[in-house]
Image: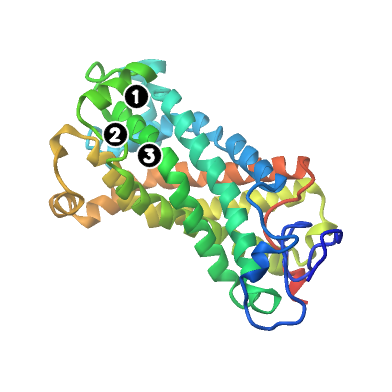
């Protein structure tokens, strides 16, 4: 077993940090017994606190892209035609609602995505380290892709519980007609509860949207980073400057954002429709049958691809910048551990 005083991380785990993994040198069978031993993975490790803080910082990009979120929501609930372009949508929103319309629901958005993004990034690292610790060195490489996907899915499932009430409120305010629903945080939350809306009413639809999106995001990001270093730059990460490494994070993040937008868009449309009075009391299956899968998958999709690609790419570069400042380096493997 690695002893607590050893500071060098195992070379076979590109994401390993000092004193976070307890791995067996002798056994070839995966064992979870090491989790309780010296050097085991602990949720109280400072590494995960740093990842939590980095994720909260990364969520700030949601405030910048809020106007695109409003247009996307209007397209999904039928207030704007799905063929309305980004710039025409912005122009119409400005003409009809002014600056207040462009930055609707900033409060619920800030709370919802600070909870979701911070929790998602920190728990992803925790579950990834825990899975690697459980499997052992001889199995990590073989199951690396599975580790990415399951860690992301588990992290997002937990994050969505914290996010759900605020996301539900955000969508309700955002898609309501002007004057039909309070826009300030306190009165809006009280009005939502007074309407008989349960704070976790849309949790199942949120899981349907967020979990596949996050699994796609992290899976594509990890593999895109690996591909860029191995096949495009063809040099190890450490040989590049920090700005160049952050550029890789941005490129991989944008690609992963576009992919997860397409995967999760039908469920995202459902979340928006569930907030509408015309669908009160209806189940998810009934709404899908009435609206149709094709419409759920395509209405507002162009806005969301631009929106999500920008958000996810920006989140990765903000998150990795924070990690770099904290001395943790950028995310993803350059493939040097495979040689």
**Which residue is denoted by mark 2 in the rendering?**
74
Q: Residue at x 14, y 51 (%)?
A: 286
Q: Are marks 3 and 2 in contact (CB under 8 Å)?
A: no
Quadrant where the N terminus sits is bottom right
Q: Are marks 1 and 2 in contact (CB under 8 Å)?
A: yes
Residue 269 locus on image (x, y percent): 29, 45
Disc 3 from disc 2: Cα separation: 20 Å
Q: Earlier in the sequence, mark 1 or mark 3?
A: 1
Between residues 170 and 50, which one lies in front from this camera angle? 50
Between residues 75 and 147, which one lies in front from this camera angle? 147
Quadrant where the C terminus sits is bottom right
**Which residue is denoted by mark 1 in the rendering?**
93
Q: Residue at x 20, y 26 (%)?
A: 195
Disc 1 from disc 2: Cα separation: 10 Å
Seen in the picture, residue 264 relative to 31 is either above or below; the reply is: above
The answer to which quarter of the image holds residue 161 is top left
**Which residue is denoted by mark 3 in the rendering?**
164
Q: Are marks 1 and 3 in contact (CB under 8 Å)?
A: no
SS for callout 2: helix
């Amino acid at each position: 077993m690695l002893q607590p005083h050893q500071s060098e991380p195992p070379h076979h785990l590109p994401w390993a940090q000092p004193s976070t993994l307890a791995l067996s040198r002798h056994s070839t069978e995966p064992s979870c017994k090491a989790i309780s031993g010296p050097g085991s993975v602990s949720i109280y490790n400072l590494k995960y606190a740093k990842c939590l803080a980095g994720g909260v910082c990364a969520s700030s990009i949601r405030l910048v892209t809020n106007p695109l979120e409003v247009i996307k929501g209007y397209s999904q609930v039928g207030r704007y035609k799905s063929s309305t372009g980004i710039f025409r949508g912005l122009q119409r929103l400005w003409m009809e609602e002014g600056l207040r319309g462009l930055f609707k629901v900033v409060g619920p958005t800030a709370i919802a995505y600070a909870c979701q993004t911070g929790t998602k990034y920190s728990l992803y690292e925790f579950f990834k380290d825990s899975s690697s610790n459980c499997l052992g060195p001889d199995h990590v490489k073989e199951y690396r892709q599975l580790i990415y996907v399951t860690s992301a899915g588990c992290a997002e499932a937990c994050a969505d519980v914290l996010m759900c009430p605020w996301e539900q409120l955000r969508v309700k305010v955002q898609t309501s007609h002007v004057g039909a629903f309070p826009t300030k945080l306190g009165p809006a939350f009280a009005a939502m509860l007074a309407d008989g809306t349960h704070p976790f009413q849309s949790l199942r639809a949120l899981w349907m949207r967020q979990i596949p999106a996050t699994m796609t995001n992290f899976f594509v990001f990890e593999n895109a980073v690996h591909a860029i270093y191995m096949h495009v730059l063809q040099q190890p990460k450490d040989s590049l400057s920090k700005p160049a490494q952050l550029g890789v994070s941005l490129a991989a993040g944008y690609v992963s954002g576009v992919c997860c937008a397409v995967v999760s868009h039908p469920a995202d449309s459902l979340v928006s429709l569930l907030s509408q009075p015309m669908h009160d009391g209806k189940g998810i299956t009934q709404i899908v049958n009435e609206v149709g899968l094709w419409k759920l998958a395509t209405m507002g999709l162009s806005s969301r691809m631009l929106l999500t690609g920008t958000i996810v790419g920006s989140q990765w570069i903000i998150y990795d910048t924070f990690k770099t400042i904290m001395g943790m380096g950028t995310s993803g493997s350059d493939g040097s551990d495979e040689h």
